[in-house]
Amino acid sequence: MVQSTVISRRSLLRTISTLPAAGVVSALPGLAHAAPEFSFKFGTNLPTSHPLNIRAQQVAARVASESKGRMEIQVFPNNQLGGDTDMLEQVRSGGIDIFNPGTMIIAAVAPISAITAVGFAFKNYDQVWSAVDGPLGNSIRAAFAKIGLYTFEKMWDNGFRQITTSTHPVNVATDLRGMKIRVPVSVMGVSLFKSLLASPTSLQFSEVYSALQTKIVDAQENPLAIVQTAKLYEVQKYCSLSNHSWDGYHLVVNGNSWKSLPSDLKTIVARAFNEAGLQEREDLRKLDESLQADLASKGMILNKALPDSFRAQLRKAGYYAQWKAKFGNEAWAQLEAVVGKVS
Ligand code: X2X
């Protein structure tokens, strides 16, 4: 975070020297606002064209305008500031101010977050939003507060995760046997695919395209909007619609950066992020209608996987029992209050 309430003489001169000569006098009264008082860096792991980044840019413009130039948010998409694990560390240390970790990524430092990524927990978006906008979401956000992060209340959508491969389509759980599949840097991701008898490898998202291209792994799993915007269809042939887990983004802010903002700016920033989050959810819902056809037109072969065989294998592997014990009865009950029995 950069806080620049004082404009140095040198930067004032530099600013003046870049102004057109005729504008100097009339521009002078505005110079007090030439540099924003508060500047936040927001790092994201997604391609520029993903709805999350488009909405993030709009948040930046809205905050600049509503704060009358006092506050600036600079968005750095596409892992420019490092991969997921790096950015998670930076948002905790204050190297960056805002980050959008996926539910499984931030579970590295707040394990309860991964409860929303439990395999086949959610059947539809009504369940998703009522859980994460409700008591379960509040429990998760409370865990982030305990580790010094402020969280905007509304999560942004990533989507239901699907499996892509370069080798063969996945219809039933046994098709995953021994498959070299990339999962996020996440105990939950590894556990899910180990339980399904695949051979998962954790990699940051920034490494996924090249890992698939060089065949370090044969498969990956992500929502269709990511398969499309990150152009994974260039290095993957099959797309198996498994909906094996839902994933979303928590928008977290370094605690000290947040505390440094005066309350009027807090209101402006939180409102902009929360409203944009709801719009981003809607963007993805609309995109979802066209993505399958779009990926097919790019040469992918899509199929619907059969979820029952996956659930049966997960039960057999003791996956649900193990995670219920890890998350504890209270959190598990908050999840089941929305989705019914999870097992
Ligand atoms: O790394 C992934 O797979 C991604 C892009 O979905 C997340 O941000 C968790």
Image (tube, rainbow, N blue to C red):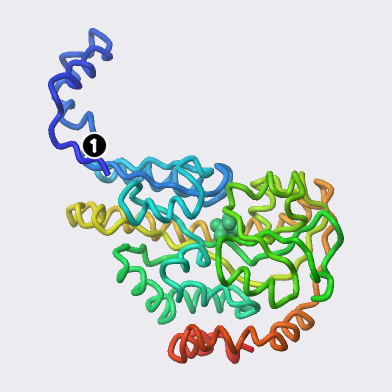
State whether residue 116 is above or below residue 61: below
Q: In which quarter of the image is ligand 1?
A: bottom right
Count all numbered tags in the image, as a single digit: 1
Would residue 242 be found to the left or right of residue 299 on screen? left
Which residue is painted at 60% across and 78% down in the image? 122
Q: Position of residue 72 (x, y in %)?
A: 30, 41
The quarter of the image holding the N terminus is top left
Q: Position of residue 132 (x, y in %)?
A: 46, 74
The quarter of the image holding the C terminus is bottom right
Would residue 326 be found to the left or right of residue 174 on screen? left
Q: Position of residue 12 (x, y in %)?
A: 17, 21
State whether residue 256 is above or below residue 62: below
Q: Where is residue 180 in the image (x, y as percent from the top left)?
A: 75, 61
Observer-nearest residue: 194 or 156?
194
Q: Which amino acid does label 1 sit on?
A: Pro
State whether residue 26 is above or below residue 230: above
Observer-nearest residue: 270 or 326?
326
> Could you say whether the residue bearing mark 1 is in a helix, strand or loop?
loop
* Mark 1 surroundings: few (<14), some (14-19) or many (≥20) residues within 10 A: many
The residue under label 1 is 36
Quarter of the view holding residue 145: bottom left
Would residue 6 be found to the left or right of residue 212 on screen? left
Quarter of the view holding residue 273: bottom left
Asked whether mark 1 lies closer than 8 Å to ligand 1, one says no
Which residue is painted at 60% across and 63% down in the image? 159
Would residue 50 be found to the left or right of residue 265 on screen? right
